[in-house]
Image (cartoon, rainbow, N blue to C red):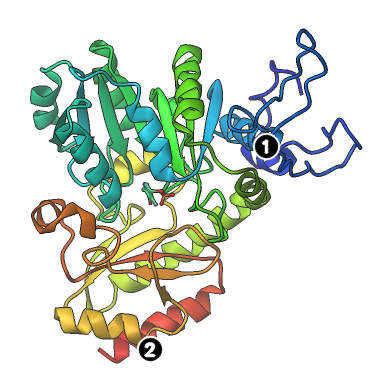
Amino acid sequence: MSNENKHTRRRRTAAVQAGVGQDTSYKAVMPPLYLSSTYKIEGIDKRQPYEYSRTSNPTRDILADALNELEEGVGACVTSSGMAALTLILHLLEPDDLVLAPFDCYGRSFWLVRALAEKKHFRLQFIDQYDESKLDEAFSEAPAMVLMETPSNPVMRIADIEAISKRAHKHGALVVVDNTFLSPMLQQPLKLGADIVWHSNTKFLNGHSDVVGGSVIAKDQKVLDELKLWNNSLGTIGAPFDSYQTLRGLRTLELRVHRAQENAEQIAAFLDGHDKVGKVYYPGLKTHPGHKIAARQQDGFGAMISFELSGSAADTAKLVEVLDLFCLAQSLGGTESLINHPASMTHVSMGAEARAKAGVTDQLLRLSIGIEHIDDLIDDLSQALDQV
Ligand SMILES: *Cc1c(COP(=O)(O)O)cnc(C)c1O
């Protein structure tokens, strides 16, 4: 497909058609998996696009092109994990550069930026991106990079990508958005003004809980070239087999995300009306403080819900054990529904103090809603809530 009409087809079509019918060797309809680490060079002055698989690999490139088309950037790097994607992005920074990061981001992202700042890779300030008055102060120090994660993990705060990008660009700062929670089917940060988007491909993009991977998509060619150089040099690249699996998962992304979201909307309403449930965090609820921004900047409210029981920590522990369908496990975005206890699982690396500030209480539970039948999911939650 020519470059001019790369961004003209709809997202579902782009995901389904990625690499289809483009095999140059045997005209295989589905793109083959190239595992070879190295490629034959015909002569010193007769070079082909592929020589060594760390630098580039045909299977990985098809996934990169697909993700780039979905996010509407200029190109993408595929990495070995979401954390490798963030590692790559942080290598754009110089020691004097200031990074603004959300105080309530994913626990391992929080740990990584804090640890690298302590090693003087860059300067760091954790900020509250949801409070306009605090942003003035943070931006007065001329940041070089602003990290965003919206909806935030796990309490689903919504940050305004367009407004923060405008502020950041006045200072020439790059805006970087972790789009893992929604996927490009529900949010396209580059179109809202961000410069770089990254994903844990492990989650919705692959969607079948059988790959750990990541990706970075850039809007500017110079930034992309620098990211590609670091991906090759750090060796943070994704494996061809993982790319092949992720490409397969990606083809049904739109169907999965929409079915999971439909389920999530009903579950959020069910939990919100249940007398044993305290707070429910779901941007689709009109009472959610970020509802209006989410409605404007997202193409849907997603499939992630957090909630607190009105009872004790012991009730929380009991609930996760008596659930039958909802498996207690880390991760999210798969076809199967999962439940997670952030304080002891995904957000343990933040430490108790940062958790308290971010609102990650011991009673908080996070649900990743899958694509099972809605009645079975609600029956399961209902029977479990009856037992606590
Ligand atoms: C899982 C996750 C990551 C990290 O990705 P890995 O693939 O586990 O390395 C980063 N951000 C968010 C929001 C995540 O959910």
Residue at 59% across / 44% down in the picture? 239
The local crowd at label 2, few if under 14, some if 14 to 19, many if 20 or more residues have their Cα within 10 Å, is: some
Asked if disc 1 and disc 2 are in contact, CB closer than 8 Å, the reply is no
Q: Residue furthest front?
A: 44
Asked whether, in this view, residue 26 is left or right of residue 183, the answer is right
Residue at 83% across / 18% down in the picture? 42
Q: Residue furthest top?
A: 45
Picture coordinates of residue 376, whole percent (x, y): 51, 80
Residue indicated by mark 2 = 383
Up the image or down, 349 lies above or below 136; here it is: below
Depth check: give the residue in front, 240 or 250: 240
Give the label, 1 or 2, closer to the camera.
1
The quarter holding residue 282 reads bottom left
- Amino acid type of the residue that numbered disc 1 sits on in the rendered structure: Ser
Q: Residue furthest bottom?
A: 387
- Amino acid type of the residue that numbered disc 2 sits on in the rendered structure: Gln
Residue indicated by mark 1 = 37
**Does residue 72 appear in this view?**
no
Up the image or down, 168 lies above or below 339; here it is: above
Label whose residue precedes the other's in the sequence (1 or 2): 1
Q: What separation in Å lies between label 1 and label 2 (alpha carbons)?
A: 52 Å
Residue at 11% across / 59% down in the picture? 352
Up the image or down, 216 lies above or below 333; here it is: above
Asked whether, in this view, residue 269 is left or right of residue 219, the answer is left
